[in-house]
Image: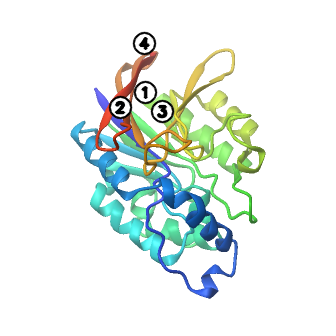
Amino acid sequence: MFKLAHISDVHLGPLPNLTIRELASKRITGYVNWHRNRRKHLFANALDLVIDDLRRQEPDHLAITGDLVNLASGIEIRRIAEWLHETGAPLDTSVVPGNHDAYVPGAHDKAVQAWYDYMRGDDDPMIWREGHKLFPYIRRRGPVALIGCSTSIATPPFSASGFFSARQARETSDLLKAAGEEGLFRVVMIHHPPIRGATSSYKRMIGIRRFAAAISTGGAELVLHGHTHLNTLYWLDNGQQRVPVVGIASASQGPGGHKPPAGYNLFTINGEPANWRLQWDRYGLTESGTELRRDHHQFLTG
């Protein structure tokens, strides 16, 4: 048995003080949006409760699917590096970046370098190399292979789209095939939902068809994503295989907003190739905002 926990859209707060130079970019729109909207609903206490309850479950691994910061300033990126160190060991925690982690040009590489130990694949060098094509990466943990993909790119103001390239699609397919030949349960991590219509056009993932082809060709048992701040279940169906695609609310969302409150997914994986059993439990913050309770239970396979 292997227990995999999943959180997303940490958006660690509070927002730090930024210089005029830092705000002279797309960050100014995000800064205004934070103070007008996000700070009313995103609470560090919610994140603390999620992590404390998650630890109670004693998962074997934690998957985090992007948007760890808000405006990708240097101080935010460093704070997340510290938060990751406090939350879990690099061998037990896998991260992929989101659009907020690449909020402005250059931020993506700074974030990846700072969080590299949590993104480094089994075969990647010990030390970050500039220009290294990190994504997709593969991490083998017990019976599970975690394949981390990136849709994280800098976009213009009022855009939050992501991009999945042809190169990444080919390499993802190759990693999935190899993991399947090894008899591993394959989990793909990505920030944007790889489903048409799952979000608004200005927030969509460009390359959805490429991603679907990679999953169809390579094979997978589970896809995890974030971005929408919603608790969702979709399916990728190529006629031969149905792959569950599961999203989760922001790990920092307080109760009372128009989006569901913070929570986490917990997957229990049993069995063997061609006979995998996947149990999905979701835990969410209660209306009181003081504890989490299981609000969903489902067997996705087996």
Q: Are the residues at dot 1 and dot 2 in contact (C-beta closer than 8 Å)?
A: yes
Quadrant in the rendering for residue 55: top left
User: What secondary structure is found at the residue carrying circle 3?
Assistant: strand
Quadrant of the snapshot with the C terminus: top left
Label 4 vs label 2, nearer the camera: 4
Query: Along the polypeptide, which appears first: circle 2 or circle 3?
Result: 2
Q: Which mark, residue 302?
A: 4
Residue marked by disc 2: 143
Name which of mark 1 and mark 4 comes first in the sequence.
1
Q: Which of 111 and 122 is in front in this view?
A: 111
Mark 4 residue type: Gly
* Secondary element type, mark 4: loop
Vertical position of residue 246 compared to residue 251: above or below: above
Spatial CA distance of label 1 from label 2 is 8 Å
Q: How far apart are marks 2 and 3 (CA)?
A: 9 Å
Q: Nearer the viewer, mark 3 or mark 1?
A: 3
SS at mark 2 in the image: loop
Asked if residue 274 can be seen in this view, the reply is yes
Task: Identify the residue position indicated by label 3 in the image.
Answer: 186
Q: At which x and y percent is residue 132? A: 57, 65
Q: Which mark is residue 183?
A: 1
Label 1 element class: loop
**Mark 4 vs 2: CB contact within 8 A:** no
In the rendering, at what x and y percent does residue 123 appear? 44, 54
